[in-house]
Image (cartoon, grey):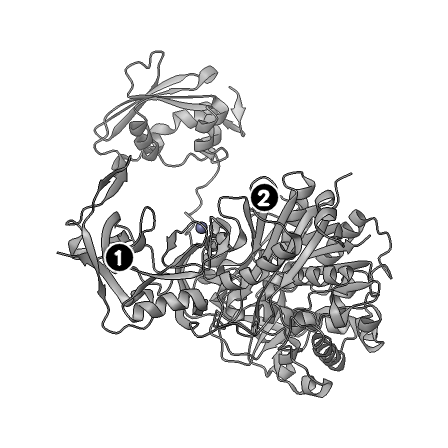
Amino acid sequence: MARRVGICAVAQTTYQRDKWHERFQGMALEVLEPLLAQTGLDFSEDKGIGMSISVSDDIFDARTISDNGMTDVLGAHMRCEEKIAQEGIQALYYGLAAIQGGHVDTALVLGHCKESQGQSRNMVTHMAFDPFYTRPVGLDFTAAAGLQAQAYADRSDVGDTHLADIVARAGRMAQLNPATPEAPVLTREEVLASPMLADPIRAHHAYPVSDGAVGMILAAEETALAICDHPVWITGVGNCMDSFFLGDRDLASNFALKQAAARAYQRAGIDQPRDRFDVVEVSDQFAYQQPMWMEGLGLVDEGCGGAWIAGGGPDAMNVNRSGGMLAGNPLILGGLVRAAEVALQLMGLAGERQVADARRGLAHGVMGPAGQFHSVAILERD
Amino acid sequence: MQSDFDTSDCYTIEGKLALPYTYFAGRVGSRFITTLRDQHKIMGVRCAACDTVFVPPRQTCERCLGDLTDSWCEVGSRGRVVNFTVVRYPDRHLPRPVPFVLAMILLEGADTPIVHLLEGIPPEQVAVDMAVEAVFAETTTNTIRDIDHFKPCDA
Amino acid sequence: MTTYFGVDVADVIETMPSRFRKEAAAGIAGSFGYDLGEAGRWRLAVRDGDAALAPAEDLDDCLAVVATDPQTFVGIQLGKIDATEAMALQKLTVAGDRGAFGSITRLFQKYLPPGEEALPETELVVLKQTISVDQTFATGPVMGRFLKGLKEKKILAMRCPVCGRLQSPPREICAVCRVRNTEWVEIGPKGEMRMLEYVYYASPDPLTGETRETPYGAIGVLLDGCRDEEVFWHLLNPAQLDRVQMGSVIDGQVRHGSRLRPVWAENRTGSIDDIQYFELDD
Ligand SMILES: [Zn+2]
Ligand SMILES: [Zn+2]
């Protein structure tokens, strides 16, 4: 059996609309320094951190090979350095694989992004499309989400009021999360009154533009137990990439998420996922995605997303106690922040939003237009 | 921001990410575009293994991994709306002033819908299943926009 | 005779004269050999815009001889096998003048199996597009202080509290010692030329999308107060590209480079362009 890998420390900056006073390096240091302090680790060649895995995106950063200018603040100068240019939760997967494979005993994971830097987040996600077939009609992740929301909402009876309630709840939750000081706190009526962006998605249904950084220290079991009182074990990870062209997919089917979840559950030895998680963090970039991803994870009955919201399902199942993506995280960090939040909950370090005696949690990340790529991680504590 | 953070030396500088690219459509893509442009015909490729007609065409079936380079078939320039959204946020990369409709359109004989502009109808009257037809562009851009947009038509 | 990909090797060979493109053969003269193993050997003689082909035993007088098996030969003619790959795998070798052989491959129209008609050449579509997203770059406190210094005609560096090295432009931490830099030091503004990159081909500047005028000189200047590798990178006055002398330290032997001074921009805004370039301090 592969050796266990634990999350031993978590740190993040606040997530804010415009950290105009800080560049990437400053945000990264704000995460790196507490991680080193919490674990007592350094980057010495013999017993220091064995690998630095950063998460960033060339077009968001406006810098080719966006990790090249970051090596010093990642402790990676003259060391083993890797970058994830995909949903940030993949860095967790990468670190897990490197440690289980025996390459290193410890790994730093650190993601950063400033969505405020570019003039428009939609222009950045527009670049993800094909220059001949899909860019010319103006597709970006918001328009693609509009198409998916339309397809999903009917199938699962998710209406405008349900969506407003999801957003209003996210704001309430975020008030207990010190990392999201600017999360919009809105009433159902305010959400319902916000203008449409891409029908049926309203302006307040979309996650806010934000800047921030998040990081973790991962370690093999022996080291984890030596440097941390409460390591959180990564017991299952799975991902799946669906078709690039929207027309090649059934947008409401959750195909990729079901595959990703099944792979993660199988690795974690979970046959029936229902009621097995004390906390769940899903990357709800748009409000409709919270019930949709919950269905795809097999935690809510298929086609019942609307009823689940109406019945208080998110509170009952401790979904996105952090406020979720709707409270504001950069796109590429969504899943990594979800994993950080689940880890904090399992460590008992979630402050005012702590779920009592949380032992097992699920973190989810999504990237690409209309949920092309999904990644699921199962985290547990002893 | 940490409360003791001194911002007195911090400011911002305006710049750009600006890069000139030359994209290649590929051989399959080139044939699709030149046929669309010169003959106003919309071509797909059919994978015999999974019996699927893909539009836009591609060289390989991602499901069967078969070579589709020479599996051309013509699909209709009419189809029906399977899904749509109304884009209402203005932005520089968008092809039209907002609001405009982006629809997923399943062309006759195709199995995969394409995303395109739907015009000639107020957004609030667009409905799933409505019949639409291609309006070809007068000037070429050598892209899918050699169909300028789709418009409603009789079923 | 054996067929490969449904095609007879002899047909490929025998149709060569009829596929010969006279118009492309100007100035090419000589014999070229084809050694197709069990399938046979041929000599192609090209002279005065004509080609003659005949079976041959001895190919010693040929400028170049291509040796391959008949299957690879036919596969390449039909576009089923990649010639470069076949060469990499040693399934196809060219002895003699490779360049000359390369030129004769262009003398023939594409081979078409009997009964197949030539398709019109497909137009290959390319799209030229400049992607452009406006950016608001944050300086942060460290780069901000450095850039503000330029506005006041000062070049600032930060010193590592552990190893003492100077970095300019300064960074938040010393990558080697992995500690925050703490001490600000003013350096230069004059210094000594250490390195010159004489740039003939300029990439587009991603900040503007425009391409800088060439040639230009990117230089490493050892500003006064700095040592060893603590060079400051900027531009050289393009008119002085051929007048500067690089300095070096080899085995402790110091060779001093040209003395340089910054030329400050009239309107300084707190950006790296506040120094227009460096020029000779004579
Ligand atoms: Zn297929
Ligand atoms: Zn140092």
C14 vs C267, left or right, is right
In the picture of the structure, the residue carrying the numbered disc 2 is B67
Residue at 73% x, 59% y is A343
Mark pair 1, 2: CA separation: 52 Å
Give SS at disc 1. strand
Q: Nearer the viewer, mark 1 or mark 2?
A: 1
On the rendered structure, is B14 left or right of A265?
left
Q: Secondary structure at mark 2?
A: loop
Task: Specify the amino acid type for callout 2.
Answer: Asp
Which amino acid type is shown beneath numbered disc 1? Answer: Leu
- Closest to the observer: C6 or A56? A56
- The answer to whether residue A138 of the structure is visible from this angle is no
Percent across and percent down for residue A163 are 73, 78
Comparing A177 with C154, the one in front is C154
Q: Image height check: is B78 above or below B43?
A: below
Q: Is residue A307 above or below residue C112?
A: below
Residue A351 visible at all: yes
The image quarter containing residue B116 is bottom right
Residue C23: x, y in percent? 25, 38
Mark 1, residues whose alpha carbon is within 10 Å: few (<14), some, or many (≥20)?
many
Residue drawn at (49%, 80%), measured in percent from left and top?
B97
